[in-house]
Amino acid sequence: MNPTLTLPPAAVTSPWTAAERELGYHAGGPVNLGWLTSDRICALGRGAHPALIWEDSQGRQRRYTFDDLRRLSDAAAAFLARQQIGAGERVCLFLDRVPELYFAFLGILKLGAIVQPLFSAFGEDSLWTRLEDAGTAAVVTQRRHLGKVRRIRSRLPALRQVVVVDADGLALEPGEVALALEREPEAEGFPVYPATAETPSVLHYTSGTTGKPKGAQHVHGALVGQFQTARVALDLRPDDVYWCNADPGWVTGTSYGILGPWSNGVTQVVLDSGFNAARWYEVIARHRVTVWYSAPTAIRLLMREGSGLARAHDLGSLRHLASVGEPLNPEAVIWSRETFGRPFHDTYWQTETGCIVIANLPGLEIKPGSMGKPFPGVTATVLDPVRLEPIGERGRVGLIALRPDWPSMMRGYWGNRTAYESRFRNGWYLTGDRASIDGDGYFWFVGRDDDVINTGGHLVGPFEIESALLEHAAVAESAAVAKPDAVNMEVVKCFVVLKPGFVPSDDLELEIMNGLRRRLSPLAMPQEIEFTDSLPKTRSGKIVRRVLRAREFGEPLGDLSTLMEE
Ligand code: AMP
């Protein structure tokens, strides 16, 4: 592929057109994600620029340039080709955030195969469900997760090859093969698969409210959206050092933990370790991180540790902070402004949308609690839940809907056309979330379509209650869910995790209730507060209210496979 393709003299009419031109893409032309994020950067003269700064829980560090990325992803592609893995086959990455994950990710795409990243913390059942659904041909894993793969392998007839990236000294079984990328022969000039915009690329599994997890199928052309949103919404510039906290098992960890930054030639930091506030601040200080993409739960955990810890580190390199995944409480925006001297910018999107679709763009005035405005090039609205037509009226809650015409939109759920089609009505893609739009065009998230509490015919958003709860000094985290009620249909019940040093008591409950009464409408007042040690969360850290709600309603809990706790 040629980095300096001759482009037709098209008028630049949208942000996507401009991004296409910069990526050297023209309709029908080749657009291989693996090549565009490594070889292309080298061809632009930035091969020696650092691509990956990696650290693990023991403080081990490794550094790789874009030229390393190009070379090692070529080697991974050549290795998989030798294992008879071909274009269109699904290759699962079942790895911690080790460097091999990133090289294999790009290598699989260079080969034209479909990459299926899964959280390495998944148990056997969760893993089996997703490998079986996708008919996965190969799994790339490491010794500490190999046992799980071995135990389910006999129930996966499509699985031909298990690749182990740290197999030195390990007795491999038939159908297993060792891959030591650093020792692989040079694969210079590997024939990169000539993917077009519609060639399948990444398959991300996401849990719905009902049914088994669904694989959202993305395509190579999605890069146009990821490239542009990374640059504009995350404010990435060529000499940034960028840190995205997300694991590639979640779409944020691929769209903005691999594709967005590297297609922009930006250095990124990867920490293969769990949450630890002091460690996180050390990482920012040590590597002079300039752009940080995090999530509300992490921010709340940092808030719990207090500003003092942040101030004890030199965080002056930070220029832009952004958040995704769940509602960002106004309190978190204000706290980050006070603590880091800059606010977190909320961004909204989903596994299905592939890239940010609504955001507080740099330069846009932040209204704390609002997720901002549609990204230029995305048409977003809220629909009346019954008519499924745009509401028009400002401030009224409806279903967030998008015109499905931006480049990164999923192209289907793997093998589940019915579920895919059920997401579209009247030319709109239904996100399954609710929000209102204010007079200035800002979107205000209310909750998942199924989390909104309907009390006496009035819709109450859990986010509003949880934000109010967080303002109490004792509250670390909370979840507000519906509880059945004979008169009002539903009432509000809150689950509250207390900060260290606070103990549950009737007096404390009364005090919290009194605090809420001042902040919320009487309709939103909880009927009950239950103190708990932890809340059920997805592996990406999102509180799963539906589990709590289902318990209150005595309903089945649904798919729990992505939950961290339970
Ligand atoms: P996922 O597909 O796992 O990334 O989850 C997408 C869902 O997370 C969305 O449909 C929302 O319910 C929620 N979400 C993502 N970003 C935000 C945000 N900025 N504010 C509120 N909810 C969000």
Image: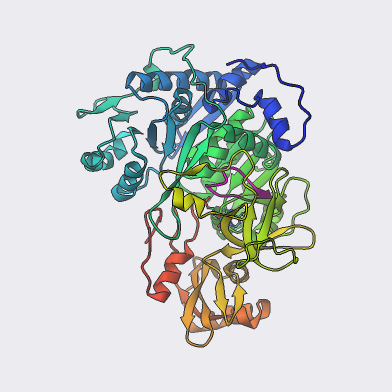
**Residue lying furthest bottom in this view?**
487
Pick the front one: 123 or 30: 30
> Is 353 within the magenta?
yes
Note whether 530 is above or below 122 in the view shown.
below
Q: Which residues are the magenta region?
A: 349-359
- In what quadrant of the picture does the N terminus appear? top right
Q: Quadrant of ligand 1?
A: bottom right
- In what quadrant of the picture does the C terminus appear? bottom left
In the rendered image, residue 4, in percent from the top left (x then y), is placed at 67, 16
In the rendered image, residue 483, in percent from the top left (x then y), is placed at 47, 77
Residue 371 visible in the snapshot: no
Note whether 312 is above or below 230 in the view shown.
below
Predominant secondary structure in magenta?
Answer: loop
Q: Residue at x 74, y 59 (%)?
A: 367
Colouring chosen for the image of the structure: rainbow
> Is 342 within the magenta?
no
In the rendered image, residue 131, in percent from the top left (x then y), is placed at 34, 41
Note whether 3 is above or below 393 in the view shown.
above
Note whether 128 is above or below 542 in the view shown.
above
Pick the front one: 298 or 279: 298
Q: Residue at x 63, y 78 (%)?
A: 515
In the rendered image, residue 80, in percent from the top left (x then y), is placed at 37, 23
Pick the front one: 498 or 45: 45
Describe residue 145's horizontal placement relative to residue 500 as left or right.
left
**Residue lying furthest front in this view?**
426
Describe residue 401's horizontal placement relative to residue 69 as left or right.
right
Residue 210 visible in the snapshot: yes
